[in-house]
Amino acid sequence: MRAGLMRDLGLGLIGLVLLLALPALFPHPSLRDFLIYVIAYGLLAMSLNLLVGLTGLVSFGHAAYFASGAYVFGLLMQGGAVSIPVAMLAAVGGTALLALVIGAICVRLKEIYFSFITLAFQMFIHSIILTWVDLTGGDQGLRGGIPRPPFLGIDLGDAGTLYAFCAVVFVACLLVMRQVWQSPFGYTLRMIRDNPARANFLGVDVVRMKLGVFVLAGTMASVAGIIMALFVSGAFPEFGFWTTSGEAIFMIMLGGTQVFLGPVIGAFLLQLLNHYVTIWTHHHGLVLGIVILAIVLGLRRGVADYAMAWLADRRAAAAPPATPAKAAAPAETKAAG
Amino acid sequence: MNLDVLAGCVATASCFVTQVSTGLIVGMLLFLVASGLSLIFGVLGVVNFAHGVFYMLGAYFAFAAYEATGSFVLALLAGAAGAGLVGIVFERFFMSRVYGKDLLMQLLVCYAAILICDDLVKIVFGADYKLMGMPEAFATAPVEVLGGFIPGYYIFMVGMALGIGAVLWLGINRTRLGKIIRALAINPQMVGALGINTRLLYAGVFGMGCVLAGTAGALAAPVRTLTPGMGLSVLIESFIVTVIGGMGSIPGALVAAILIGLTRAFGAIGFPLFTDGLMFALMGLVLILRPSGLLGARTA
Amino acid sequence: MSAPPNPGVPILEVKGTDVFYGASQILFGIDLAVARGQTMALLGRNGAGKSTTFKAIAGIAPPRRGQVLLSGAAVSGKAPYLVARAGIGYVPEDRQVFPEHTVEDNLIVGAKAGPRGDRHWTAERIYEVFPLLAGMRHRMAGRLSGGEQQMLTIARTLMGNPDILLLDEPSEGLAPIIVRAIGDLIRTLRGMSVTILIAEQNMHFCLGVATHATVIDKGQVVYSAGIDELRGNDAILQRYLAV
Amino acid sequence: MSNGANVTGRRVLLGGAAAGAAMLAMPRIAGAQAKVIRVGMPTILSGRVAILGTSSRAAVQYAFGRINEAGGLGGRTLQLVERDSKGRPDEAAKVTRDLINNDGCEIIIDGEASSGGFAVHEVVRDLPVLCIHTNSETSSLTADPKLHVKTAFRCARQGIHDAVAGGVYASGISKQRGLKRWMTCSPDYAYGRDNTAEFLEFAKMYDPAIEVVDQVWPRLFAPDYTENITKALQVKPQAMYSALWGGDLVSFIEQSNLYRLFPNVALFSSSLGDPPVLTAIKQLPAGLHTAYRYNRNYPEKPANTAFADGFTALAKHEPTNWAWQNYVAAQFIAEALKRTNGRTEGAALAAELKGMQISSGLAVEEKLTLRDTDHTLIGYPTAWGRTVPKAPFVEDFAPIPWSQILEMETQWKKQKGYA
């Protein structure tokens, strides 16, 4: 466990350095913009995958927490009374509370019914955002921009600093999620996904475990929402609309649900796809639809999952007599799959 | 809230008749769409998230046929048959490949269908809104019933929907094919062992569900605007209906559709600012208290 | 039952059939032949491969090698419903009635013309042969007792006018008195010259109803003879059927 | 914020854009040397309101085409680069940044609806290129000084202008015919609510006898309005105001026709007078009151008819309200570029556009003005007319004088704390 933590920290640090180096090496604002989008939506997708890939809870309403993070943060900053870190903590805390209340109701339901009720709550929150115009600005979102006053000598008004800040927050969140992914809690969740009856039989409090991961996923999604709000300097009802949830689902399917970083890869691929498709054609629905069909019906799983399975197959074919180290790799994918 | 007005309306024959008819008008098209959704889920065990597409296609096919021939009957048939055919193609080539896979795969295939069809409709029919226009036969003054008014076309529309619902119910419960379809829902392998082509039957049932959605679209075309993406709000409402009624239950879809229709009709009188919220609240409540819906058999 | 076209050829022939589940082989070159009018018992211990043989014949577990012939024509490789239409009436184990259908509706779902368009079996005819079912034709099948359900599944498959009836473990899990009734029923069908292949662990039951027997063990045929011969062969009975 | 700093910022951005273009494998020529001036347009090209984007795009293409055919601007041609935001504000922000940072667009025509418009507004605050909002009618976008962005302008109708015009017109009719009992039916979102409240405020101000007996708020993009229509049958108002628009309005009117609502209730609509709406309605009742959105016969000028013909030839349908707004925006941009001799810096163009007047066939009188104080368009037609079942669909346009509108606007601004 300790060694694993050190390794994760090391890898996280390398990832962070890479993220920070990229815009420095290619000083082009649109690359930075692109990466911030990957970071925000990647984090949203990663948090959703805690529910979908890890626990087998297919939430259709995850964007609600993305929106909640963005709105609470934006409103607090527009209020002008608190600094950015305090507003962030408050937004994350508020969203955790929201996820706790909603989750307490939702996690009792199974399969498609869980999906529907999360969708219902999301639509409910979306309609609150739309109708509470005095607070939220309704369909026009939080107007007038979100102020970014400097704190601790950090000025997020500067685009480069903002990017670096987002990258640090992103990597920190990934590390937290990685710890959960690898922890006994994470393995309990996998057992709940694969065989809830057995988990129950072994004395696992299934409802409580599900609620725990539901709240965690909600808080992580709220961080993604905060990053988005910081970047576009606003918050919009679309953040909490079903299409945002749908896109997050698409990202994790595109990238893969069983490899830890799969959703980020999915977010990256979708952003790339969106970027180029919208440039070259106005029929991006057509193109995107065909790409989805090709991936779902062709690969039948996410790109990262596909690659891992392919690698595992190759390794198994290359070395039939299983040495302990070789045996561990397929076993890991097996446990994950 | 406006409970006095609501009470006043319920006590007045003319208001009561008009609002009940409103509930049926709003509810019956929803019922057609939702019953198709429910049929598909009940027999195939998949949620057709692309169901709104077939409502849209039904409307556009009807529109095109009406423009070409001027016959409302042909328009209805074109809407129903066209949506059904596309449904069968969609089932055979795409949907059938993700049966038994996880929910997300099915969701994505449907999402792709929505994206593609919305774009194709935009390419073929243009981005601007279209309306089919009311057939001559229905260009009459609304019928007066006990002081309330009901337009002739809506009487026809509700009658059609109820008729289709009745035929569907009789077909499923009284005919041999219906009995086979119900058996298919429960034990497809056994049905196959009895010499019945289950794949054909799956495609047929899926197509039938799409015919129902397409018929709803065609019936809506004279009174509702046609735009690419018009299936979305109908999809969401029919989901609410299916969930409240019970996934897979057609009588449940009927009960829930009328319930939603009446909620909207009397909600507009009693709680004008909260009719939409009322629908979501109803769905949430049903899911919490009875996840399998009012008349659903499957346990959640 | 109208006569199949080639009276000399066995109704059902299984030739050198191998079946795999994934990577593991279950059946090794099974050979089996059932002639018209026979009641053949397929005997073997639990896990010997009886059910898999049936699934291979019914097209549910298609053989990787070998052939299944019905009246001399290959049916292996066809989809299960086509195998059923060709004249193989497969009654799986576990009495899979449609529980929310009435008895009569179960029969209606099973009704189809035989491979040569004959409609020998009708619901009325079924009720004559299965008088027990006649009295409960409007009852939900899920409410029937195990034995009644077993009769219903047999009756339902007969409604499809098959050339041969495959019964997978018809006596399993039933009380002795019910097993006797099922046995009587099979003998009645035998008397009507229905060709039957029956898979069983319960040897005594089989000895009472079958005319011929084939014994399989570990996915291979180890013995095949008339039922009287088997009855006299203590070695086989001891070794493979462990009575 | 000095102009100098802005200009340097731009240079850095453009340099970055040139470097990045190679990196992202998009061989686009950017920078001031290029013969082509690229104008970016984030707008909605998919989904239910795609016609907003398609007609906006066609109008700019039509305008640019004419300018380029006539030799361009000192040998340089204008090119439109449009991107679909799918109606999502965050996507609008992203594509706007991309258009500027990546595609080398030096000017933005913001063809977004209101919500996207506010998002684009914030991007332009960050990346100060010239931006003209062409489709957002929400008053606060330019009226609220807190939201002011130096290089952003609005070339579109404005809610408050329409509200005053509507109030003046409606009160005139209501006094004349004794329409006291009013009901409203508007979509339940910020625009629908603001628009309705402002209309009622001015209508009541001019005719205090007006009493609002009921208000219903159907959902935006609702397919069915029957419950609202039958509610109107119960309430029996004498007049009805609706801020429904586009396809929703078409559905609402056709469904009301089934109940024969409008012979008994006088309808006042903010958006009916837009050609696609008028032509989509199969049975347009006569005598509905509507605000002018666009009409080939009004203002009655040859230049207007020529625009209608030219646009229709390109887009295959009559111009929309969005079309004329974008067409005019393109004309303003061309004029500003002429005056700067082709310099595209946001600050330089903004300096020219402040208070700029151009002669236009689409002006209610002679000229259209981009007012210097709040960067918004005035002088466009603010008339109301009555429907007739056949083309031209709306007749008897009654203009509401701009002097009256401007006077009320000033009062409104004071009351809102904007001035």
Image: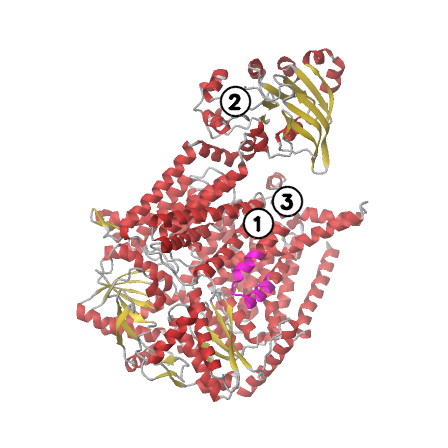
Magenta span includes A281: yes
Residue at screen point 65% across, 34% down? C62
Label of residue C155 in the image: 2
**Residue ID at (40%, 73%):** D311
Camera-nearest label, 1 or 2: 2
Residue D55 seen in the figure: no
Q: Nearer the viewer, residue B197 or D398?
A: B197
> Which residue occupies 40% across, 80% down?
D376
Percent position of residue A105, x then y: 49, 48
Q: Is residue D397 left or right of residue A21?
A: left
What amino acid is found at the position of numbered circle 3 in the picture?
A: Met
Q: Which mark is residue A191?
A: 3
Res D296 quadrant in image: bottom left
Is residue D36 found left or right of A141 in the rendered image?
right
Secondary structure category for the residue under label 3? helix
Please state the extent of the stretch shown in magenta in the rendering: A270-290
